[in-house]
Image (cartoon, rainbow, N blue to C red):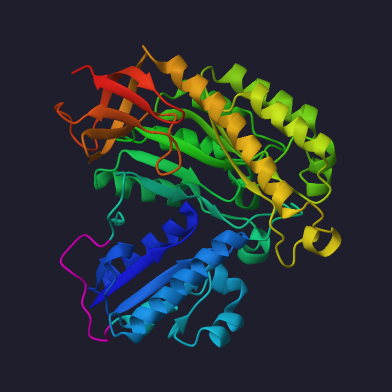
Amino acid sequence: MRVDIITMGCSKNLVDSVRLAHMFQKRGMQICFDPDEVGGDAVVVNTCGFIGDAKEESINMILELGELKAEGRIGKLCVMGCLSERYREELRTEIPEIDLLFGKFDWEGLIDALAPKDAKAPNTDINTPPIPRPRTWGGAYIKISEGCDRSCAYCAIPLITGRHQSRTIEDLLDEMRAYVKQGVKEFQIIAQELTFYGIDIYGRQAIAELVEQMAKLDGVEWIRLHYAYPTHFPTDLLRVMRENKNVCRYLDIALQHISDNVLQRMHRNVTKEETLQLLRTLRKEVPGIAIRTTLMVGFPGETEEDFEQLLDFVREARFERMGAFAYSEEEGTYAEQNYEDDVPEDVKQQRLDRLMQAQQEVSAEIGQSRVGKVMRVVIDRIEGDYFIGRTEFDSPEVDGEVLIPANEDLQIGNFYDVSITDSDEFDLYATSLI
C-alpha cells in the first residue's frame, strides 16, 4: 500500500511528516513525498494554519486533491496538522471529500486507520528515522520542543500547539545518533521557541547544554539554530557557538519590529534598546555570525514614523538574512480581539516592498564582500550546469546558495572548500579548490 504525504508550512510540520512516514514504514507501507507524483492509495496533507496565506495554500491543496479523488486518481484523502487542529469541524462540513480528519496531536490514529490489518514491517532497520525524499538537501530537522509559552498579541501558534513541552536531552541525542548512523551530517535544530528549551523539565534554560552535547557527537558536521526569541536570550549559548566548529555561526531570531510603540502593542516584552544591545552582543561574542530575522509590517497602530524606524533598522543592522510579511489578523489572538486592523492593505504591501528592497540592497553588498574569500560548502544537488551548495550561513530551502560549475569532480552530500568568484542579491558563485 502506498501513502503520499504532502507537507505544507514550516519545517516543524516536516518533522511530524517524517515521524508519520516512519510509522507507516514500520507497517510495511510505501511512502512518497513528491506532491507532483501523487497517486497513492491514500494522500495525507499535513496542513499549516499560521497566517492567512498559509491557510489558503493548505485549503487549496485539499481542494485540488479532492478533485483528483473524484477523478479516481487517488484513494483516501486524509488531513492533519495545524489547520485541522483549529478548524476541524469547519473542514468536515465544508470539504466532504475528506475521508479522515486529524489534528496536530492526534494524527497517530492515521496509522491504524490506513494500514492493512495484516501489514508486516519491511526487512529494514525500522529504528532508523527515514529522510523524506525527494529533498534538496541531505540533512535532518531535529524538533526539540513543541508549543510556546509566549503571548505575542498577533500569534495563534499557542492556540494551536498549547504550552511549551521540551523533549529530554537523552531522547534528542539518541535521535541524532540514529540519523548519523544513516549518514546524515547536517542538522537544523528547530522549535517554536528555542531559548525556552528545558525550563519545563529542567527548571532552567538548557539550550546551551543541549547544543554542546550535540556538538560532541561523532559524525555531526554542522548544527544550525532556528527560531530564537530575543527576551531573556541565554548568552551562554554564544560561548557554545564560538567554541565548537560544528555549530554554525548562524542564528535565526525573529525580532518582528524595532519601534517601542509597536513592540509594546505586540506584547514582545523587549524594547528597541534591548534589541540593539542583544545584536551588539551577538556580533561581539560570535565574530562573523550570520543573523537571520523575521519582521512584520502593518501591525495595528503602526504609524509611518514606526515604519521608518523599521526601515532604518534594516539598513543599519545589516542582517545577513531577513524575511518579512504583512500583518494578518488571526482569530482568537489578543490583537484580533482588542485592536482594529487599521493599516490599509495597500499601505501594508507598499511598506513590505520597501522593506524587502532595502534588505535586497544589504544582501547584495554582503554577497559582494564574500567575493575572493575561501568558504566551506556542502553540496546539496546538481541543477542544470551547476552543483548547488550552501555555506554555514545558509539554511536549506530558505537562504541563499552557492553555484559551482558542474564539470568539477564533486560529490553530493560532501563538504568542500571553494573560492567565491562572484555574487548577486542572494546567491554566490564559486570554484572548488580540489
Residue 26 shows in the view: yes
Q: Is residue 122 magenta?
A: yes
- For residue 398, what is the image quadrant? top left
Q: Nearer the viewer, residue 423 or 293?
A: 423
Q: Is residue 130 magenta?
A: no
49 w.r.t. 118: above or below: above
| Quadrant (top left/top right/bottom left/bottom right) for the N terminus | bottom left
Magenta segment: 116-126
- Left or right: 392 with respect to 339? left
- The x, y position of residue 221, in whole percent, is 33, 32
Does the magenta stretch mainly form a helix, a strand or a loop?
loop
> Of residues 409 and 122, which is closer to you in this image?
409
Residue at (46% x, 61% y) in the render: 8
Nearest to the observer: residue 427 or residue 214: 427
Q: Residue at x 69, y 41 (%)?
A: 351
Picture coordinates of residue 386, whole percent (x, y): 23, 33
Residue at figure coordinates x 54%, y 85% from the top left: 92
> Picture quarter containing residue 408?
top left
Q: Nearer the viewer, residue 162 or 395?
A: 395
Q: Please tell me which residue is depicted at 27% across the width and 86% down the height of the picture.
A: 117
Q: Is residue 313 above or below residue 210?
A: above
In the image, 253: left or right of 363? right
Q: Position of residue 138 (x, y in %)?
A: 29, 44
Q: Is residue 290 something that shows in the picture?
A: no
On the image, the x and y values in percent for residue 192 come to: 58, 51
For the C terminus, give its image quadrant.
Answer: top left
Looking at this view, name the residue that lies furthest to the top.
372
